[in-house]
Image (cartoon, helix red, strand yellow):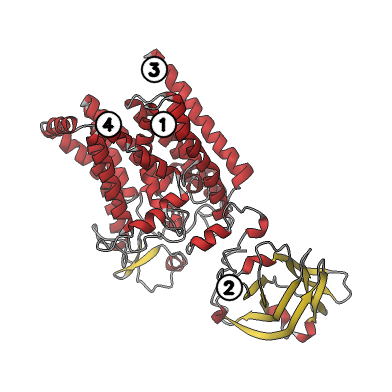
Amino acid sequence: MKLLSFWAQRLFFAEMLLIFVFIFTINNYLGNSKTRINADGIGYYDYLPSIFIHNDFVKNNIPFYSDSIAFKRIDALDVYKSYDSTKLNKFSCGTALLQLPFFGYVHLTSTSEGSLEDGYQKPYQDAVFYAALFYLLLTMVFLRKLLLLYNVDKSVIFIIQFFLLFGTSVTHYANVDPAYSHVYSLFAITAFLYFVKSYFNTKSFNKFLLASAFLGLIFILRQINIVILFFIPFIAGSSGVLKEGVLFTLKHKIMIVTGFCIAMIFVVIQMYLWYLQTGHYLIYSYQGEGFNFGNPEFLNVLFSYRKGLFVYTPLLFICLLSSFHFVIKKQYFLFISWFSFFILLTYVISSWWAWWYGSSYGMRVYIDFYAVFFIPLALFLMNLKSFLKLLVLIPAFLTIPLNLIQSYQYKEFILDWTQMDKVKYWKVFLKTENKFKGYLFTEQINEGHFKTIAELSFGDLTLQENFSGEVVQISSQEIPDLKKVKFIKVIFENNFSMDSQARVVLTMNNAMGTKNYYWLSKPLLHFAQSFSVDWQEGFYIFPLKPFEDETEKVIALEFHNGKELLEIKNLRLKFLVLFNINVGFCILAQ
């Protein structure tokens, strides 16, 4: 026992070291995110500020079209959906439950600022990040304990844990989007598999109850993830062990009833929260969304450039291939049970109506099941001699820089979040320079919310090599109500070459040139509208800040083109003011 304790302490120290290396990588290479509670993550998290700060969670007695502060707040969030005469958070509560200790600490120790945004300030954003790191650490602990049940060497376990942190989408979802449910579901499913495996080995009453508890947690994290029950045959290890375990369980009715009650405690929490919102205990919260089991998108989910699992997490393809070693070793039950679960899981995932799962990095829904992929890889490595092991590890380790670069590209708007395709992918493959930030994203405003108060045309320009200077100069007196202008839109045609070093700069100074009001420089290549033609129209959005100074100003457009001939056609400037002050706007990327 002392020896086991000694090794456990050493392995936990190694896991802590990996977490610190992960944080170091974020701080020094990938970069920290300004906000970490985004998109779907808001839905998973908003249980906490709704209940503990805003007191607007119980909505079943509030009229749907109420002018109350409660409905104004939730209407500003895109995670509450109409249900009967009220609004319902369509996301499950399990993630918020796991985040609660971290939220609670910040809430009790920090001074809140503001009102409508309470619960989303930086201390809360950081709390969610640390929550994800904590459960990621626990994931590695349970992954280690699970692999030890398979007698996997500690060195191989360390490599697998390293792969998990740096070779998969966990890199992104523990940093940029830690409020999403995936890291928490990964923890719950990995722990569940460990306790199920332990139960088959020991027939321990306690292991069964703990497995039941984690199954309940899995359900309230993301209901569809109870599909993990179909992986139990693989965890059993053989048909004989599976049969023996099932028969043993059926003989112990008290254990079954107790386990069911423990799992139901978690389910009842979700049901009660549904009731508080809608007055109903059993509901389908994803109104208007569902599965299309008759038309699964297998190939897209696995191989598409848009979100394909093996494109954005190629390490998992190596894990998939490693499952074939069960066939070589004539462990057919393990191969059939593993591959059958993979097909079932992919079928379910690919049948969701939006198989690309919105604006997100990679095929994120597989993250929850990463332990399933790493078990065969670990066992495969264990059965290889040193030379052959290197032949597997070298390509596996090469996927790590690819994953880190692609994670960085997504964070910095170099990858298109929703509409990635083959042409776009190879255009920016491994590109990390600043000039590529936003290359696949154009800045967008809804021009239906704005009106053009002035539009000026300047024709065609040909700028020789090493040109650097103004091409347009406009007096503020030419623009009516300049101080109301929200955006200046610069439009022209160009070939937008990938190799271009040219930049377009908009400035605003006083008439004497002694005071600067505005300066913004943007790379010319950012706004290629199409990748199928050489000559096209591009545009640039320059957002202006309000100013009260009424003195004459000079607006200037500059080009700095470096060692290239620059041809600009049909150059135009539009000055946009907000048409309806009650309508907001957004800029997709800068």
- In the picture of the structure, the residue carrying the numbered disc 4 is 197
Q: Earlier in the sequence, mark 1 or mark 4?
A: 1
What amino acid is at disc 3? Answer: Leu
Residue beneath the point at 58% across and 51% down: 430
Q: Earlier in the sequence, mark 1 or mark 2?
A: 1
Q: Earlier in the sequence, mark 4 or mark 2?
A: 4
- Image quadrant assignment for residue 307: bottom left
Q: Left or right: 318 with respect to 244?
A: right
Mark 4 to mark 2 CA distance (whole Å): 57 Å
* Numbered badge on residue 533: 2
Residue beneath the point at 73% across and 75% down: 567
- In the picture of the structure, the residue carrying the numbered disc 3 is 4
Tell me if label 3 and label 4 are in contact, CB under 8 Å: no
Name the residue nearer the viewer: 229 or 252.
229
Q: Mark 1 falls on what kind of element?
A: helix
Residue beneath the point at 22% across and 26% down: 204
Instruction: Classify mark 4: residues with Cα within 10 Å, few (<14), some (14-19) or many (20+).
Output: many
What amino acid is at disc 1? Answer: Val
User: How many marks overall?
Assistant: 4
What amino acid is at disc 4? Answer: Lys
Q: Left or right: 222 with respect to 35?
A: left
Q: Mark 3 falls on what kind of element?
A: helix
